Image (cartoon, coloured by chain):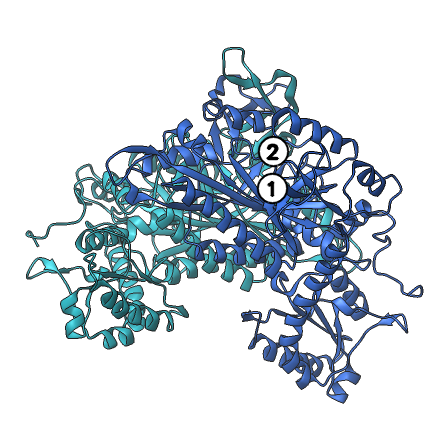
Chain colours: A cyan, B blue
Amino acid sequence: MSNIRHALNIKREDDFAQWYQTVISEAELAEESGVRGCMVIKPWGYGIWERIQRLLDDRIKAAGHENVYFPIFIPLSNFEREADHVDGFAKEMAVVTHHRLIADGEGGLKPDPEAKLEEPLIVRPTSETIFGDAMARWIQSWRDLPLLTNQWANVVRWEMRTRMFLRTSEFLWQEGHTAHATDAEAKEHTLTMLEVYRACAEEDLALPVIAGEKPENERFPGAVETWSIEAMMQDGKALQAGTSHYLGTNFSEAAGIKFQDREGGEKFCHTTSWGVSTRMIGGVIMTHGDDDGLRVPPRIAPYQVVILPMLRDKPEDDALLEYCEVLRAKLAGQQTLGEPVRVLLDKKPGKAAAKRWDWVRKGAPIIIEVGGRDMDNGVVSLIRRDQLWNMESGKANFQTPSRDEAGETIPAMLGEIQQAIFDEAAARRDANIVRDIDTMDGLRAYYAEGQKAPGWVEVQWSKPTGPALEKVVEQLKELKLTVRNVPMDRPDADGTCIFTGEPAVERIYVAKAY
Amino acid sequence: MSNIRHALNIKREDDFAQWYQTVISEAELAEESGVRGCMVIKPWGYGIWERIQRLLDDRIKAAGHENVYFPIFIPLSNFEREADHVDGFAKEMAVVTHHRLIADGEGGLKPDPEAKLEEPLIVRPTSETIFGDAMARWIQSWRDLPLLTNQWANVVRWEMRTRMFLRTSEFLWQEGHTAHATDAEAKEHTLTMLEVYRACAEEDLALPVIAGEKPENERFPGAVETWSIEAMMQDGKALQAGTSHYLGTNFSEAAGIKFQDREGGEKFCHTTSWGVSTRMIGGVIMTHGDDDGLRVPPRIAPYQVVILPMLRDKPEDDALLEYCEVLRAKLAGQQTLGEPVRVLLDKKPGKAAAKRWDWVRKGAPIIIEVGGRDMDNGVVSLIRRDQLWNMESGKANFQTPSRDEAGETIPAMLGEIQQAIFDEAAARRDANIVRDIDTMDGLRAYYAEGQKAPGWVEVQWSKPTGPALEKVVEQLKELKLTVRNVPMDRPDADGTCIFTGEPAVERIYVAKAY
């Protein structure tokens, strides 16, 4: 392996954080905008987001939701009304105070003091309170329930330390908001959407995730229950990739979301909310990226196959392009993973080898080069991005199927790649979950300084609440750990609480996290 | 006709503005949000926008553009740098001045004086200046050109008088931004995108439009040329439905967008920008709506066919649902207008007749009712929304094809409806363009008070500029008229200028406008 010359000038093992920034830059996913904490999402990055949007939107609609759009501005008074929610979000939000600029007398501009808003407007950090206002208008009787809505939108949270895709002042997301007649139905819907997120993460993004409930201290501000999907990054840290909240009647009581039940009585609705964001793309990078750049799972790749003709600015180019076009058309006419194959015949100027490495860094699942000799032999030179290197030779791992064979086998190959990179991530995740630590000393040793990329530890605890929980949180904080969630698919607790020594109530995952 | 009981409580001819608001409310398209000038777009309205987005996005991508996403915030200094642009937009914009709230000491919240931004941020009214910053980074040589980008985003302009869809403080749109090596190429691209808009308006939204260049005084702030598509509403007023701008090197010079040409010299890029917005939906309402509500062109209808089983909460319902499901599945498996038929089997509780009128007001192109008797006879009861009334009987114009026949003929029928409502709008538009007025007195008489829904007048003018143009603008303002554009498809001028008496240079449309 030592003779492999990787396509990035930095390796994951040397500096994971720097490697992450390098991939974002070299794969042309995004860049700093110059506006504090906000990024510019470039075509390849936005193309991945469009794919995630399309697939998740289909899943959300299939679960009965309708899309809507609510204002970006929320009046300050909406936040004043919901105390818990304010505590969680009021701290860092963008506040609009004026609606006009005027000359500042020095050749510049300033907010016009005459155009100060009577009530400041908040750029939405999330939209529970303004959806709540509408739900109160829209819902009268049990016949109006359940109300199942979703919106795709930008939101702003004034983060102090930002990192592209993972934590930006502005980000793109979807936020679902639903209202139900009973707590049971609302709780069930919270889990239905958690399952939608799990399926999207695992089947579309090839991100293996653990679905479970967050502990009390990690709940969304104003929620009764918060559930999450958590993914393990290659440095062993956890990434919360999506959350689904059962809000009880907290927001209903604040906004007056009431309905007349079948018996004629008036009741508050039980509401839910749930969201995933462009943060998912950060998860894709840190799960599937390697020392050559990004690897995009075929299902969310804007192009699944990129064909690079080795053009020479000569008359022979026409025949070569025609040869490539036959393959492009054949692939585009076929289905893979339930959709037409997305294939690009890249005719842009530039040397084929340089373009090959551009597409390697961007992570196109299959890259095909075609030169004059390939054409003469009726073949193509094909690289699977997930099997880039021939480990023996240290060279790029080209296959040379006939053009016709490539046209026939690529759709199935894309399905294999989707599965292969999921399996690879799942195996790594499983290998880095430790289940045999049952003392705080053991935990300290595992996460001791200098330990290389430790993973997650499953421990048992007594599910403390209030001050007892705060004490546990402090203990974990010393190790830079947090409770990720209470996994849904693990056996019941059968031991003692690692923190208190009391009989354990449930199993939890603890980990370092983004 | 007098015995027809229309589905709205107001007619277009009685109060067009009030009728417009009523359609928006009764068709459940949108509603006031309580946040100044911002609306909530409801599922049926947002579904129409999603259809427009999907179709227009395909056209924009087919023209070679890639989607990106830029920050919602633009630093104040970006506006200070481009004087013409500022004059046009600086007046009314949302200004973010703080990034935190704190308790106000009276149980409420206020912006934290400690968290005042050093430089205020503007919520984007349009993004030329921030795209310009990135273009300056991305473009080095002629090889990087043309740069063809687009974004779907929300924008905010602090409008004093707002009207849903037509003029709202926040609206949704796409904005394209491109950079080119030469003025000729940039100008050609400006017209390419104008043609994309024309095709989208006419073929997708069934809105007949006039494409042409705006006069100098109506140009986008900072543009060298502004082109528009203009549609005629049923009250005779014009609606600017999309604009495409050639920006020359104005924004390039402000942002430093330069490239090295093939000869090694450094030049400024020529840029374009172009946008259409949720305003288009206002155009659809005012073009295709009638006294029974909205009529949605099939191509942009979220559902093209709605099937309403007359359920009775009895065991027979199952057979009826099965009977309807066969038709639904048959339709969903077929194509119309190049896509699968979008069909809803509406099982929600409620009386079929009430639900029929809901869907009439919403404007579903084809509404099908199925009762027990229909099932026994093997038929369905079908209404074409564009042929709602039987004028002789004054009753709803039901057809009763066999279920199998309906399954076979509906895809083609949807194509006919798309064409029919376009033809209807085009005929009305053509009947309301007057071409034989060649004096100001004639113009005054045509637009005199009390004149019922006058249309547009084509006049010839000498294409005045500067102060001479201002004088013309004043003359038109007295009649509440504006120059809409210089149509592309009309013969050369051959007369005298209606304003100055000089030899005419071109033909223009004048009209009242939204």
Q: Which residue is mark 2?
A: B157
Identify the image quadrant of the C terminus of chain A. Answer: top left
Disc 1 secondary structure class: strand
Compared across the picture, whether B10 is left or right of B74 comes to right
Q: Nearer the viewer, residue A330 or A430?
A: A330
Q: CA distance from mark 1 to mark 2?
A: 8 Å
Residue at the outermost top position: A105
Q: Quadrant of residue A316?
A: bottom left
Residue A505 in the image, given as x and y percentages of width and height: 42, 52
Asked if residue A180 shows in the view, the reply is no
Q: Is residue B1 above or below residue A445?
A: below
Q: Is residue B467 above or below residue A176?
A: above
Residue at the outermost bottom position: B377
Q: Is residue B31 above or below residue B293?
A: above
User: Which tag, 1 or 2, sits closer to the chain's start?
Assistant: 2
Disc 2 secondary structure class: loop
Give a yes or no on whether discs 1 and 2 share a subunit.
yes
Identify the image quadrant of the N terminus of chain A. Answer: bottom left
Q: Quadrant of residue B496?
A: top right
Residue B491 in the image, given as x and y percentages of width and height: 63, 51
The residue located at (32%, 59%) in the rendering is: A297
The residue located at (61%, 36%) in the rendering is: B215
Is disc 2 surrounded by few (<14), some (14 to 19) or many (20+) residues within 10 Å?
many
Q: Are marks 1 and 2 in contact (CB under 8 Å)?
A: yes
Is disc 1 surrounded by few (<14), some (14 to 19) or many (20+) residues within 10 Å?
many
Q: Which residue is mark 1?
A: B171
Q: Nearer the viewer, residue A131 or A227?
A: A131
Q: Is residue A505 above or below residue B99?
A: below
Looking at the rendered structure, the kind of residue marked 2 is Arg
What subunit carries mark 1? B
